Amino acid sequence: MQRRQFLTRAATALAAAGLPLPLLEALASPATLGPRHPFDYAWLKGHARALAGRAYAPRSDALPAPVANLTWDQYQAISFRQDHALWSDVAGARFQARFFHLGLYFKRPVRMFEVAGGQAQELAYDPAMFDFGRSGVNGKKLPQDLGFAGFRLNSPDDVRRDWAAFLGASYFRAVGSSMQYGLSARGLAIDTGMPRPEEFPDFTAFWLERPAPGSETLVVYALLDSPGVAGAYRFAITKGEPLVMDVDAALYPRREIERIGIAPATSMYQVGENDRRMDWDWRAEIHDSDGLAMHSGSGEWIWRPLGNPEHLRFNAFADENPRGFGLLQRDRDFDHYQDDGVFYEKRPSLWVEPRHGWGRGSVQLVEIPTVDETFDNIVAFWNPEAKPQAGQELLYGYRLYWGEQPPVLPPLARTVATRTGLGGVIGFERKRFSQRFAVDFAGGGLAALAARNATVEAMVESSRGELQTVSARPLQAIDGYRAMFDVVPPDDSTTQIDLRLYLRHEGRALSETWLYQWNPPPPSERRLY
């Protein structure tokens, strides 16, 4: 390709993406796409607002034949060459960035810029950056303006393992000290769990700010675009346990958005101790997260175990100015998973902490049926009470914590296990069908109470049906207590029954609040054995 052709095509792509004319006029170097130009977050917000004022321009996902039809194994065979890593030549830099190649599920080019001294410069795609291995792709035959799919971050002293990655739509993920990926976050969720296709906004461009020597924090900016909204994001990423991302988001809707999801987290739950609907696998538990935790604006701590329902299940937990929420992996026992390949017990939890008051709204949870662990079927996010309107500016600031434990823990006892099965009393004939729930609590002051066998009450509420055999007794194995109760469905329907439980001692709450949704089986499946 002749240089003039390359610049002409690049300029056309820039104009289609809605980027300003100074960038178009600055194309001068084949190694980059122009000299440096002024850049800061205020400029990015202004650009996103201007973009939202125009009709959405869909981006092409047409790729050259050699990369358009790559299989999973072929795509995985393409690797980035370490000697091309961004900042690998910067003395004292604690971060490096490497780029993902287009192909497989990642078909829309994402533009990359480096920011230094308040100036930005676009980075040009070069096939020489990649080792195509056994992919069957001849890099020399690829167009010079192909672009990138995303990027990953690693440390100079560990170039083989990355600890954060931005790839696909507005998805990104990170790890704590375990260096084990698991659930993902998104820039934004739109119409998730609605009776129509979900809208997936894209990060269309990233600006990576060159870190100062010795700096522990890396700053990344992103432009978001979709038919419904344009947005500007700033991520200040600090590696550690937990890894912390300070996020600022400025959103500019093009239309009214019926269900917007702020700070969405996406995870997987196939089977676990409380939901064995898909227990055909030899492993007893398969999940990236086992529960949704919430710290409400009123100070209440709530734990909602996840499940793999037979039909899509949607829950909204109303709140005002939430203090935090997140999808957690509380179960850290390898023996419960027995997976020595992907190590589910090492999967990070993700906690969302608002940096200012978010007002009235709800934490919303969507659980989608899945038969396979390769499909993410869990989504949790904040939904403001007022629907976003065209022309508005919505500003959100929050912190994301990736690691084994969230940054704050309930001062009360926490739920450590939820198990269900057939109810009734062993040794006595069952007259009616019932479901048994056994919920274990540990921490807080339970150890001391269990040591002296103190009387603890299980405070249980049910939206429907009859509660039976309610009890709470010490469980020395965990230095805590086990609450148990049966629920007898009131009729033959499969209508959902909402359950609520906490432990109490001498009129004082001892534990977080456990919430659960249970759908009784149809009468034909209510075997009494």
Image (cartoon, grey):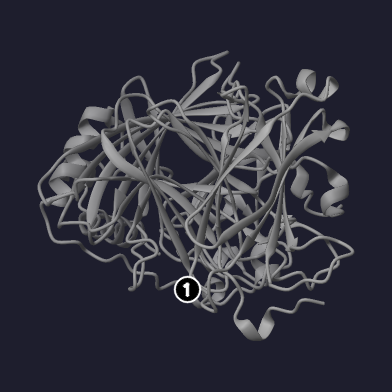
Residue type marked 1: Pro
Q: Quadrant of the C terminus?
A: bottom right
Q: Residue furthest bottom?
A: 524
- Is residue 30 among what the camera can see? no
Residue depicted at x 78% and y 18%? 448
In this view, the residue in front, 52 or 440, is: 440
Percent across and percent down for residue 488 are 62, 65
Residue 79 in the image: above or below residue 41: below
In this view, the residue in front, 254 or 278, is: 278
Percent across and percent down for residue 228 are 22, 58
Residue depicted at x 34% and y 38%? 319
**Around disc 1, counting alpha carbons within 10 Å, would you say few (fewer than 14), some (14 to 19), or many (20 or more)?**
some
Residue 85 figure quarter: top right
Q: Residue under label 1, please give it.
A: 64
Residue 319 in the image: above or below residue 143: above
In this view, the residue in front, 76 or 268, is: 268
Percent across and percent down for residue 66 are 56, 74
Residue depicted at x 83% and y 35%? 475
Residue 191 in the image: above or below residue 398: below
Q: Quadrant of the N terminus?
A: bottom left
- Is residue 483 among what the camera can see? yes
Percent across and percent down for residue 218 are 49, 26
Element under disc 1: loop
Residue 43 relative to residue 117: left or right: left
